[in-house]
Amino acid sequence: MGEFDLIARYFRRPARRAALGAGDDCALLALAPGMQLAVSSDMLVEGRHFFADAYPAHLGHKALAVNLSDLAACGARPLAFTLALALPQVDEVWLESFARGLLALADEHDCELIGGDTTQGPLNLCITIFGEVPAGGALLRSGARAGNDLWVSGTPGLARLALDALRGQLALPGELLAAWRVHLEQPTARVALGQRLRGLATSAIDVSDGLLGDLSHVLTASGVGALVEADVLTDLIAAHPDVATAEATFDRNLLRRCALAGGDDYELLFTAPAAQRAAVQEAAQASNTPVTRIGRIEAGRGLRLVDAQGQALQGQFPSFDHFA
Amino acid sequence: MGEFDLIARYFRRPARRAALGAGDDCALLALAPGMQLAVSSDMLVEGRHFFADAYPAHLGHKALAVNLSDLAACGARPLAFTLALALPQVDEVWLESFARGLLALADEHDCELIGGDTTQGPLNLCITIFGEVPAGGALLRSGARAGNDLWVSGTPGLARLALDALRGQLALPGELLAAWRVHLEQPTARVALGQRLRGLATSAIDVSDGLLGDLSHVLTASGVGALVEADVLTDLIAAHPDVATAEATFDRNLLRRCALAGGDDYELLFTAPAAQRAAVQEAAQASNTPVTRIGRIEAGRGLRLVDAQGQALQGQFPSFDHFA
């Protein structure tokens, strides 16, 4: 047994949901009758998706959270995941911390690590996640219809604001920076909200590359356009306690840019019929997840950005390609 | 859309088996009633699992083949896979070739690419594969029983012999080297044999890290020992056309070492009751896969290696840890 097999010990636990867990050639999973399997895979690379000095427990959290977020966007319930890990060397302190952060979030969502691979190589984390969703009930990108409300969970832009601060592009007191980086390094996947939106939302996507960029995927898949109220989003981030109490003044243009194109938010962007506003709010309350109505779907193609007076806004808001 | 989204175009095809394929947050898969999902994940890293100058079509083949081999070892039928890919830069010639090799093997096994991820980073290929197996019918490592025959498919050791030749540790004519490297770079996953062994074999594993090392996993999981006839394996590789017609003389110790501990074989090592010998041969013929009986399972713990006269062999045969 090589040292890279030993790594597996940090992640090994008794099989629970899996009929057969890690340690055989395959893991075995059963699906309840009438359920479909939802599958997503994300690869995280040092320097691109996280900093080399990222706290390993946070990295473990984030690697799973971004995958949970994909399940959330489909309205799926998490079941299990595989972890493939390339490491430059075996660092037991790093591994213990990484596994702790990863498995704590896995436990929180009753999502079982059922297998994977470990090897020597430049640091690379690849998680493939499995969830279940009633057949035909998954939230898709393609269901947005003209007249639908456009909603978003949480406060888009905080992760990007934290990234700017970590890069030294924003001057922040140290204790504030520590609070902010949680938004970047320990995102919350909106798993409970996603499941409650099944049958309610007409489309959904998780915001990983910037709100406008991800919205454009929904618009393309659905063959519709949208109007987005930029000031609603700017007010939302400006009013967030971490920003409002920062004893610093932030340029509204910066806040708007972060909210519209920041990336790494892992919030749910979704559409629902206007008649379902109360039901959406109930779903949000039941899942303890704030949601905000930020615009509406329109029949024409294209994306219109307006201010509080309904005036069209100019400006480029390119999609956020992680640390690129 | 960044250039790394464009990569996906090389892999995009219409969804077939998947209810929803690549392009949404998750892919959706249904399982037939009574079936379990078999899942395996393998990560391949440059310099460890393949050479930097590997022909990309062969690399695409191998990345999927090693995952198909895990399904074969469980007796599962391939359904689908995800591909996560980190690339140093976008090289369209490389991508076209890689995708061609990958998808040709996928088509051969009716195994659908349903999603994944692409990012910039040191070259890294992570495939997670999904197969189906009747509930309770999967071949496991834990079912070997004393008195069972020990079988292996194909000719273990050829891949390692090719690796030694590629490293210049064996002098070979160029055309022979070209023929040999196929064993290393384009392994054949024994998918059809694996499925036919369900209900027949008592345990199975695929030989990726060397026959003796992988056998030891079966012995540990099953709580048994084994006797392995080393000369049967040495004769097998010595008689393989690529070796026997090589117009070179190979040291039998080298051949034995390659067969017993070579690695990268992706052959099936399995056990079956002695009463099933004819049935095993029928399964082998029906799947067009040669199999050889190489020993038997014993009640005690431990692994006994004997020569043709039944004499115990000395020697260290460490497990093959890829290019380490």
Image (cartoon, coloured by chain):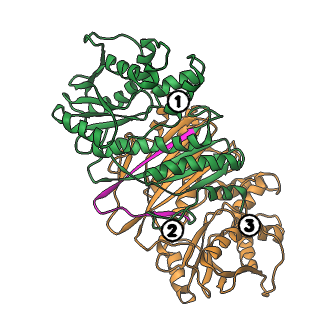
Chain colours: A green, B orange
In the drawing, what numbered circle is on residue B261? 3
Looking at the image, residue A301 lies above or below residue B223? above
Is B188 colored magenta in this rendering? no
Q: Residue at x 33, y 55 (%)?
A: A36
Label 2 and label 1 in one chain: no
Q: Which residue is mark 1?
A: A179
Q: Rounded to the nearest whole Å, what is the CA distance between mark 3 and mark 2?
A: 22 Å
Q: Residue at x 68, y 81 (%)?
A: B226
Mark whose residue sits in front, 2 or 1:
1
Which stretch is magenta?
A25-44
On what subunit does the disc labeled 2 rest?
B
Amino acid tagged 1? Ala
Q: Which residue is mark 2?
A: B74
Instruction: Report the predominant secondary structure element of the magenta stretch.
Output: strand
> Number of callouts in the render?
3
Amino acid tagged 2? Cys
Q: Residues within 10 Å of mark 1 (few under 14, many from 20)?
A: few
At numbered mark 1, what does the secondary structure look like: helix, strand or loop?
helix
Q: Rounded to the nearest whole Å, what is the CA distance between mark 3 and mark 1?
A: 53 Å
Is A43 colored magenta in this rendering? yes
Q: Mark 2 and mark 3 in contact (Cβ < 8 Å)?
A: no
On what subunit does the disc labeled 3 rest?
B
Residue closer to the observer: B164 or B314: B314
Q: Mark 1 and mark 3 in contact (Cβ < 8 Å)?
A: no
When asked about the image quadrant of residue A121, the answer is: top right
In the drawing, what numbered circle is on residue A231? none
Q: Residues within 10 Å of mark 3 (few under 14, many from 20)?
A: many
**Image quarter (top left, top right, bottom left or bottom right) of the N terminus of chain A:** bottom right
Q: Residue at x 40, y 70 (%)?
A: B134
At numbered mark 3, what does the secondary structure look like: helix, strand or loop?
helix
